[in-house]
Amino acid sequence: MKHWIVLIGIFIGSLQARTLDYDRIAQLRSRYEHAIQDEVAKPKVLHLTFHKGCCEEVKMVAQELGLDLTSWHIFGAPLEEFEGRNSGHDVYNMFADRAQRIWEKHKDYFNQFDVIWLSDTAPLCRIFLQNNWKKPLIVWICNRFDYSHQPSAFPDESYNELFKKALTQENVWVISYTPYEWFYALKKGIDIGIHVIKPIGVVNLEPNWHKSHWNVPEFVDKPNTVLIDPHVNHAQKEHLTTACKRMGIPAYCGTYNGPGDMKEFKGVMFWTYQWSNMCLFENIQLGKVHFVPSKKFVKELCASDAPTHHVMQFMDRDNTYQFNEWYAPEHKDIIVYYDSWEDLKDKVAHTDYAAMRKKIVAFANDHKRKMLKRWRRVFSQVYEQLGATYDA
């Protein structure tokens, strides 16, 4: 009898243990279901841009931050899909009627998203601002707050006033991707603040098969040749190639099929034609060595008959080097500056490339960490406004 009592006790205890297990499973399942609901409820972000490089950049940032992102590269499809007509580069000129036409065509789609993120040219914001968009709107200015395709009457005064008003709205974040953006806006009487988040520089090393005709010719000895950045006009190309030939500097100035096709070059020779370029940050991520004329040499070039870029002339005239990424104080140790053509020849020949590349890569890693930290801060504010929890 005693043995039966013991066996019954063990059996009951076993049933109780199983009951506890089922309770635990029920608890875990409940938590799992809530986790799924939280994931489904993650705010949806729509990124609109005209620029392929910005598209890749934002995709990478979204992956790092765990965002639910949908990207729309406007020029990646026929313009009829965006505007309802093919207006060519005039699509940049965001007059009120164009903005309204785009809004009416896509408002149901836009309203499916919790956050709109705009990059490259800021006038895209007019689509949303003039239609009383109340959800978070991020305007990442990469090419002037009032960029236009000329000749055009854009920007019109009503756009400027709309943009000024947006700066007072809690649901709008206006961010420059270089200090020059806020400096330029301030010159136009618009104070957008000094919030800057620079590109990290997403690098896709895969060649574009449909642009294989852009490939660097096979006869070019890349490891012993300097690439002259091709963003120069004919006169500038002639001036730079002639100077390199005269100094005996092996140089190539022609097309190349993306970052992967230029990676093996000894270095990149750059004449500033913009205040900031995505390619600078892409090249930094690749550890590329840049050869850039020093401030001293820029002054000499601008005073000579050299066909310099208007940006170089503007820097020299108004002393605005601090707003140019190639002369930014934080970049002074990862760029090789030359004071003359003779100095360029010497530095191309005697730079310690291995040490320089190591320094550039270390900078690139730290730069990426800092920029992602700034984006996290932005999206923690965005999520807070939406009443969501941001835990990336």
Image: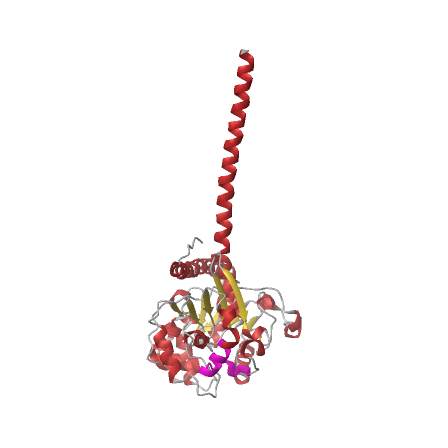
Outermost top residue: 1
* Residue 100, magenta (yes or no): yes
Count the marks: how many?
0
Q: How far across and down, in percent of the image, does residue 37 sit?
A: 49, 52
Q: Quadrant of residue 132?
A: bottom left
Camera sees residue 31: yes
Q: Quadrant of residue 261?
A: bottom right
Tell me the magenta residue range.
87-103
Of the pair 267 and 204, the residue shown nearer to us: 204
Prevailing secondary structure of the magenta residues:
helix
Of the pair 328 and 78, the residue shown nearer to us: 78
| Vertical comparison of 159 with 26: above or below | below
Of the pair 120 and 127, the residue shown nearer to us: 127
Q: How far across and down, in percent of the image, does residue 316 sit?
A: 38, 80
* Residue 232, magenta (yes or no): no
Dividing the image into 4 quarters, which one contains the C terminus? bottom left
Camera sees residue 201: no
Q: How far across and down, in percent of the image, does residue 304 sit?
A: 43, 85
Of the pair 323 and 262, the residue shown nearer to us: 323
Q: How far across and down, in percent of the image, does residue 13 sit?
A: 51, 24
| Vertical comparison of 102 with 23: above or below | below
Q: Which residue is drawn at 52% across and 33% down?
A: 21
